[in-house]
Amino acid sequence: MAKITMLNPIVEMDGDEMTRILWGWIKETLIYPFIDLKTEYYDLSLPHREETGDQVTIDAGKGILRHQVGVKCATITPNTARMEEYRLTHLWKSPNATIRALLDGTVFREPILVSCIKPVVPTWVKPITIARHAYGDIYKGVEYRVPAAGTATLVFTDTQGKTWQEGICRFEGPGVLQGIHNKDSSIRAFAHACFRYALDKQQDLWFAAKDTISKQYDHTFKEIFQQTFETEYQDSFTASGITYRYTLIDDAIARAIRSAGGFVWACKNYDGDVLSDMVSSVFGSLGMMTSVLVSPEGNYEYEAAHGTVTRHYYRHLQGEATSTNPMATIFAWTGALRKRGDLDQTEPLSTFANALEKASLLVIESGKMTQDIGGLCTGMHPVILSSQEFIQAVRFQLERLLESRSA
Ligand code: NAP
Ligand code: MG
């Protein structure tokens, strides 16, 4: 079979540890044999970020702004233990935070559902997409460890030099301080992305925050969402028979647990970080959670929602064949390839992406899967495969699918 050609490249961001290993296997086995792959490659592994003073992450982000589509492998966000392990000169920032800040986008996380895995919350029969605001709050926070007694004040100076200030706390001894911010423009872009995504998916949109306590900060989010909805989306929502609702974050959690799923849940940055792990665990495994960052200009960055799976990597280094789930990473590739195909009107690329997703799902539904989801499977005795065996099984299934189509 002739390989599919691409008109424009995808920005490819390689990463760390076990996911870097999976990345290589996925490309070798599931992509190269079928596609004449065009990528602009950036190595975001921690050693290479160290070598380039993290410039490579900024270059990769700018690459996405140029080419509109990126696919990213999980990367280590260094902490002090990693600093020693990798002999770093700096505690480099999270690459995801750097790229999100460049793209100012919204992250949509959706679980991959398979019929043999019943969610832990039995009422959740439809997927819940977490839409995570990807700018600001604690992820762009400034922190200070207060060493001793003193006074903390919040000060704002406008461009004319006029100041506003208010006391935060009079410390009698040591403590902690944090300064966080967000911008109306970013919140508005977030709101637009969520309303558009909900219309695209034909699903209700929920937004939740804590405006009863946070009377300026969270209240601003609530107001901007409401205004955006009323001025631009209310009519289309009504026509589609879908709804938008705002609730307090604690109430939203209680309602979500009792719901049937099937909605888009817009979350502030931190809430989205936490809730996406909860949602993915309910539906199966972190290895089954996809993630896409969408910028207001229509740039897309696809990745798995999970990290570099360090524990598996150390076992891999000792020669063990680990059963790390490659599904979310495969779906990051299919998401990027399909988007490239759609944007460039290269239909075979989008069709291939759909076939690869279908083949992966068929393998799991035939009872072959990785360890993490094996125990969650009902109505069959699953065969547990190593990552490489699973990827091989997908290859076999994919070839059969493509052959039956070309026949
Ligand atoms: P993690 O890599 O997501 O793994 C946490 C645990 O979840 C694993 O130990 C494993 O459980 C399970 N798991 C996650 N993905 C799996 C998969 N594909 N297949 C099977 N099991 C899976 O999170 P972490 O251990 O907290 O973080 C490791 C590194 O990843 C850190 O350096 C962190 O900075 C980085 N990280 C990167 C990103 C990103 O680039 N987007 C996101 C999060 C974390 P068992 O060990 O019990 O099998
Ligand atoms: Mg997280």
Image: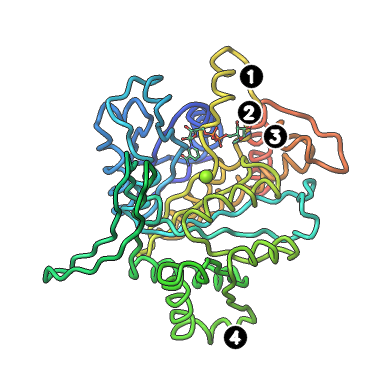
- Write the residue at 43% across / 24% down: 81
- Write the residue at 47% across / 45% down: 4
Closer to the eye: label 3 or 2 = 3
Residue 387: mark: 2
Report helix, strand or loop for mark 2. Answer: helix
Q: Does the residue labelled 3 lie within 8 Å of ligand 1?
A: yes
According to the picture, the residue beneath numbered tag 3 turns out to be 372
Q: Do the residues labelled 1 and 4 touch (CB within 8 Å)?
A: no
State the residue lying farthest toward the left. 160
- Write the residue at 28% across / 49% down: 62
Q: Position of residue 146 (x, y in %)?
A: 33, 43
Q: Amino acid type of disc 1?
A: Ala
According to the picture, the residue beneath numbered tag 4 turns out to be 239
395 above or below 163? above
Residue 321: mark: 1
Q: Position of residue 360 (x, y in %)?
A: 66, 42
